[in-house]
Image (cartoon, rainbow, N blue to C red):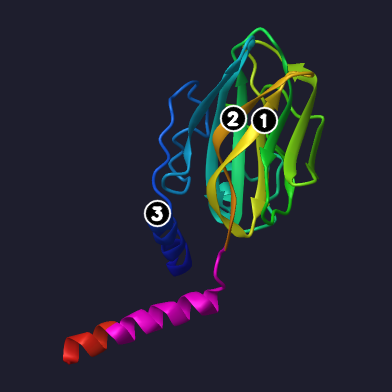
């Protein structure tokens, strides 16, 4: 509990709230168990390729509390999740999220609220997380939940939504930063150091 509280407090202090326009209200957008400031919806549009991407970043424990048994099993302490909604006339064949820092397991997950098009493949390709859909996501459909985990805290990044040929860049998606989550021992030392400083100031 101390580690989770410290993690969330540090996250809120290090990164401001990410404001995004609201599209579809999927199960990820505004999820109550997501890390503060790391849930929302981002629109994309390029010609007939249009839609939104819901996202949420969870601790692995909170992800499992909500989505255990739905397909994806996280491998690391932070879980990055996305869901693509297609509102244009072009289909969506691939979703890519840029990753320049460490990530581990990748996959998809399903819930009664999601329940549309699963990815045929989910893989790390170079410095990207990539989900390929065949059949593609057609007008009015959404993807399953897309997920990967990382040992690092989130930052604002970008991705690409592709319709088989052309694509559109989606700016504002969460992606791992270069800041790893401290080990529990390090957190304890930081807490003790802060307490000692407070006591010294109080009694001096």
Vertical order, 154 against 196 (above or below): above
Of 45 and 2, nearer the camera is: 45
Confirm whether the magenta stretch covers residue 183. yes
Q: Which residue is mark 3?
A: 12
Q: Position of residue 135 (x, y in %)?
A: 80, 18
Say whether disc 2 or disc 1 marks the residue closer to the N-terminus: 1
Q: Do tag 2 and tag 1 residues touch (Cβ < 8 Å)?
A: yes
Residue 201 in the image: state x and y as whole percent. 21, 86
Q: Secondary structure at mark 1?
A: strand
The quadrant in which residue 87 appears is top right
Quadrant the N terminus occupies: bottom left
Q: Which mark is residue 29?
A: none
Q: Distance of mark 3 from mark 1, alpha carbons?
A: 27 Å
Magenta highlight: main SS:
helix
Q: Are marks 3 and 1 in contact (CB under 8 Å)?
A: no
Q: Quadrant of residue 134?
A: top right
Residue 50 inside the magenta-drawn segment:
no
Residue 196's place in the image compared with 142, above or below, is: below
Q: CA distance from mark 2 to mark 1?
A: 6 Å
In the rendered image, which residue does mark 1 sit on? Answer: 160
The quadrant in which the C terminus is found is bottom left
Looking at the picture, how far across and down is residue 181, in whole percent?
A: 56, 65
Residue 194 image-quadrant placement:
bottom left
Residue tagged by mark 2? 170
Q: Is residue 157 shown above or below 91?
A: below
Assess disc 2: are there few (<14), some (14-19) or many (≥20) residues with their C-alpha within 10 Å of its C-alpha.
many
Disc 3, SS: helix
Q: Secondary structure at mark 2?
A: strand
């Amino acid at each position: 509990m101390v580690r989770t509280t410290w993690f969330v407090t540090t996250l809120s202090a290090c990164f401001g709230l990410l404001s995004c326009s609201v599209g579809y209200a999927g199960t990820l957008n505004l999820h109550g168990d997501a890390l503060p400031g790391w849930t929302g919806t981002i629109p994309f549009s390029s010609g007939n390729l249009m839609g939104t991407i819901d996202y949420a970043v969870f601790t692995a424990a909170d992800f499992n509390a909500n989505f255990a048994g739905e397909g994806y099993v996280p491998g690391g302490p932070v879980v990055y999740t996305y869901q693509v909604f297609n509102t244009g006339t072009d289909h969506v064949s691939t979703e890519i999220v840029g990753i320049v820092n460490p990530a581990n397991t990748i996959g998809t997950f399903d819930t009664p609220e999601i329940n549309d098009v699963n990815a045929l493949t989910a893989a790390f390709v170079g410095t990207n997380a990539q989900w390929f859909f065949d059949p593609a996501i057609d007008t009015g459909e959404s993807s399953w939940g897309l997920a990967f985990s990382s040992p690092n805290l989130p930052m604002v990044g970008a991705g690409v939504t592709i319709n088989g040929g052309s694509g559109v860049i989606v700016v504002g998606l969460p992606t791992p930063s270069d800041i790893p989550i401290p080990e529990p021992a390090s957190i304890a030392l930081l807490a003790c150091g802060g307490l000692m400083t407070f006591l010294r100031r109080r009694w001096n």
